Amino acid sequence: MRYNPKISVIGAGNVGIRYTYSVIIRGLARHIVLVDVNKKRAEGEAMDLSHGAPYYNPVQIEAGEYPAIENSDLVVITAGRNQNPGESRLDLIKDNTRIYAGIIPKCVQYAPTAKYLVVSNPVDVLSYVTYKLSGKPASEVIGAGTVLDSARFRFLLGSHCGLDPRNVHAYILGEHGDSEFPVWSNAMIGGMPIREYCNICAHNSECQTEEILDDIFNEARDAAHQIISRKGETSYGIGLALARITSAILNDENTILPVSTLINDFLGVSSVYLSLPALINKGGVKQVIKPNLSTKEREQFQNSAVTIRKVLDAIHFN
């Protein structure tokens, strides 16, 4: 990457701006372009963010049209219709596919060499749509996937155990949605499998382990619904999660994150985007990690694939 990395954010709504703010605070870019159908809002956001310039590392922030995204290193697509209370992510598909059909050709026209980070929901479907519409290598089209879901999972596990969540190593994989699943078979705390750690946990005498673990996963899976029912949207958590993915790309970190990526020949699954641990660097997805899953987890992964494939077939993306 260049010393002065450029990021273009397509969609200046709550998620796009929370992400932009996170990127600015972390000093990940030197040039950020905000593109939105509501240009006045994008201009206002760029002005507001720019006025904090004395308090963060130098970065040019501007609102622009698609030609302004030229020479971007990363294009982050957050545009789309919002998820309404009680609505699943998959309910959004028709409207957001139509929106993406207008966005992606313009991104390819003006930023053909950029890596694309897809955020809008349903993210696994729209990541595949972006891959097909863009004609880019799958390694350069990355979905936000279950990076946020896994962060929620780690936070809740850490809270229950009284631990720093950075010491909890556990993934939620599959669909970013209702068919996602926890990988208990590979979850670790302090170098120990999580169920072994439960035996020495200070809270062991206070809980029924399996019941509590199930409750923690369910809370992580359903967190977006709970937040949306209270405040109408989710944006801070995903903004931070996206900044983490951005850092892995722009800083060439070789970091493993559970992003949504093209699956080829894993457990009989191919030609869908789903979350698996993936090695991320300046080239995008360098390697997809294929973990050794339990029998139940394999079935859950295959179920996620069936769920996404049915939607892709319905909208004629094969």
Image: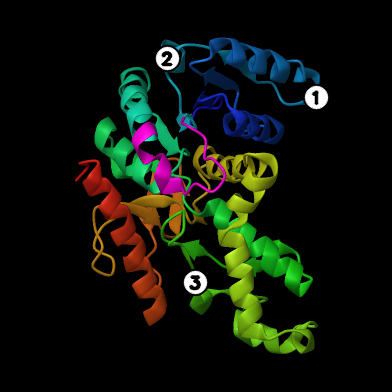
In the displayed structure, 240 sits above or below 61; it is: below
Q: Contact (CB < 8 A) between labels 3 and 2?
A: no
Callout 1 crowding tier (Cα within 10 Å): few <14, some 14–19, many ≥20 = few
Q: Earlier in the sequence, mark 3 or mark 2?
A: 2
Q: Could you give the CA–CA distance between mark 3 and mark 1, rounded to whole angstroms?
A: 41 Å
Q: Secondary structure at mark 1?
A: helix
Q: Earlier in the sequence, mark 2 or mark 1?
A: 1
- Please, what is the three-letter code of the amino acid marked with disc 1? Tyr
Task: Say the numbered circle drawn on residue 183.
Answer: 3
- Please, what is the three-letter code of the amino acid marked with disc 3? Val
- Which residue does the numbered mark 1 point to in the structure image? 55
Which of discs 3 and 1 lies nearer the camera? The answer is 3
Q: Secondary structure at mark 2?
A: helix
Left or right of 7: which side holds 301?
Answer: left
In the displayed structure, 152 sits above or below 157; it is: above
In the displayed structure, 42 sits above or below 269; it is: above
Q: Residue at x 57, y 68 (%)?
A: 170
Which one is in front, 146 or 97? 97
Which one is in front, 73 or 160? 160
Callout 2 crowding tier (Cα within 10 Å): few <14, some 14–19, many ≥20 = some
Q: Earlier in the sequence, mark 3 or mark 1?
A: 1
Which of discs 2 and 1 lies nearer the camera? The answer is 2
Instruction: Return the x and y of residue 245 as percentages of the image width and height.
Output: 53, 44
Instruction: Return the x and y of residue 132 as percentages of the image width and height.
Output: 25, 37
Q: Residue at x 41, y 34 (%)?
A: 116
- Which residue does the numbered mark 2 point to in the structure image? 66
